[in-house]
Image (tube, helix red, strand yellow):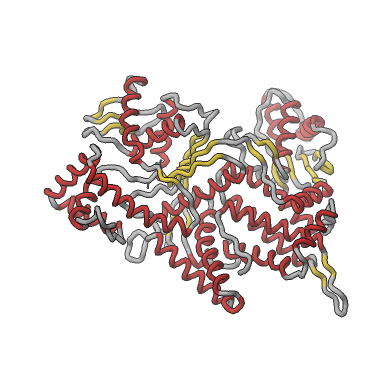
Amino acid sequence: GGAAPKQAKKYDYVQVEDYGSSILGRLQDLFKTAISQAYPRFDVPLLLAETPNPQFGDYQCNSAMPIAAKLKSTGVNKKPGDVGQEIFAKLPKSIEFIDKITVMPAGFINIFLNQEYIKKQISNLAANGIQLPKIAKRRVLVDFSSPNIAKEMHVGHLRSTIIGDSICRLLEAVGFDVLRINHIGDWGTQFGMLIAHLYDRFPDFETKMPDISDLQAFYKESKKRFDEDEVFKKRAYECVVKLQSHEKDIVKAWTTICDVSKKYNQIVYNQLDIKIKDVGESFYQDKMIDLVKWIKENKPGQLQEDEGRQIMFPSECEVPLTVVKSDGGFTYDTSDLAALKYRIFEEKCDWAIYVVDAGQSLHLETVFAAGRDFGWYDESVKRIEHVAFGLVLGEDRKKFKTRSGETVRLLDLLSEGVKRASEKLKEKGRDQVMTEEELNEARDAVAFGCVKYADLSHTRTQDYVFSFDRMLDDRGNTAVYLLYAYARIRSIVRTSGIQQEQIAEYIRNTPILPLNHQAEMKLSKHLLKLADCVLQVVDSLMLHQMCDYVYQLATLFHDFYNECYVIEKKEGEAPIVHFHRLALCEVTANVISTCFKILGIREVPKM
Ligand code: ARG
């Protein structure tokens, strides 16, 4: 039988310069070459995956069957087993990391890894630290978080923040040049009413930062006045006009409102260790004017009149973009078009990633289609993509809300996480064995780590249920479980009585660690798959694949630790120190730490 194939690459866009310890990546290259030599006219996707059953080796190539089927359709009858043999014949006679390859009569090609090679690779990681695969450097722009000023940041933005930050961390880890961009909604006609309301409620705002603790309520108040009070409405419109003509006082009022909002958001970013640069919609004010001019001059006929509006239908799009409103103003469509143009031509990025909820897919796909129609980019060279995510649901499986049906304030949510994490640690008696400082550090790592991990460990494109109880469970695939596992591994080394320097010296003097026990070998093979995991996630941008990887790693470590003594104590004898196992503990902890960095989880040495 064969395992499900790993997802094929969407683009052959990521150019790997050095696979590092990646085995799957190397195998894929070898088999691609062999298949294209054996069957040069067939462009079949490569099916190559890990095998769950060791009887069939470590990896299996299942491409012979579809090739045989294709041959048949051209009138050639060849058994899959023979196709398998022909592919095998084109492989190099000896491959350093492969022990043997067997071709089954049904066409499956089984690949068995060479154990000495595994040991050598682990010894290398122990001696030189974790090395990630090297990929040709790219300039990537990640548009994430991107809340709206007047309305409060909500859980949807929290997802974008967490996923976007983790994508940035991943791409930074493989050496990309990453622009972390906050496309905040800081522009539009709604600012008229906010400014007018600010003048009434905080007349001294120019000298004193207004104390608006709840911008959401402020927004609601002003909206109510706007809807009910004609005089106020008129003033709000005047404010919009004045803002657009950059009238000093009005700009100051606008800045004030933005600052209040950003100050709040910054607290959330600080707690979650998020770095991001604001380049909001307001940045494109003039660029939108230029854009419309550019379209009219260079792409005549693209814009069409529709009841006073100017709209366009990009190729194969059903819903038009509104580029200019009937009152001459611009829209969300216009700012995204201007942003796309700027990102391609001014920022010169090779890859742009929009981490935005799935509900905006149509909008973004239409904007990208317009960009292609304008000839701004070629899909085979630049990767411009919407990285969509599902909704956050409450435990009732409905849209996540407070009991009274309000949107949940992120700061409140995070404070609750901190409170719950603190209770959890006390419940486990950790306050008895840790200093207050250690306890606080662990509490925050648990609180923020669990919120992030719960989000990242779910398939991005699906909705997920937000549950503190579930995410703070120390069994199962949670941050708490992993943080404990990590701290335990570090403590094995710390309490072994062996100094780091002694371990380092042992590693220096032992070119090949004797990892002969099968639990050591299983753990080692998984450790080497970090490189494959990284390459896969760079392609798919599905962070749950990394969560699954690190969770499985913790589980395999657990098995290893149950079966193998690291320090062996016998009655009346001096304990036996298995140095190579201490080294394996170190490599495992370092791999987990690498994953934590990418997932944005703070590690703590003690829990
Ligand atoms: N501010 C938008 C919202 O809250 C998200 C912006 C996403 N980025 C973009 N370039 N459209 O819905």
Q: Residue at x 63, y 65 (%)?
A: 605
User: Up-down: is 559 above or below 231?
Assistant: below
Q: Residue at x 33, y 52 (%)?
A: 259
Q: Residue at x 41, y 31 (%)?
A: 341
Asked if residue 53 can be seen in this view, the reply is no
Outermost residue on the right side: it is: 573
The residue nearer to you, when weighing 553 against 240, is 240
Give the total of numbered labels: 0
The residue nearer to you, when weighing 27 against 59, is 27
Report the quarter where the C terminus lies: bottom right
Hey, which quadrant is residue 324 in on the image? top left
Q: Residue at x 71, y 61 (%)?
A: 557
Instruction: Give residue 562's position: percent from left, percent from top.
Output: 75, 67
Hey, which quadrant is residue 70 in on the image? top right
The residue nearer to you, when weighing 134 against 45, is 134
Asked if residue 528 can be seen in this view, the reply is yes
User: Up-down: is 546 above or below 365?
Assistant: below
Can you tell me which quadrant of the image ligand 1 is in? top left
Left or right: where 209 falls relative to 437? left
The residue nearer to you, when weighing 400 against 526, is 526
Outermost residue on the left side: it is: 231
Instruction: Give residue 76's position: percent from left, percent from top.
Output: 73, 24
Instruction: Give residue 415's position: percent from left, percent from top.
Output: 43, 66
Instruction: Give residue 326's position: percent from left, percent from top.
Output: 22, 33
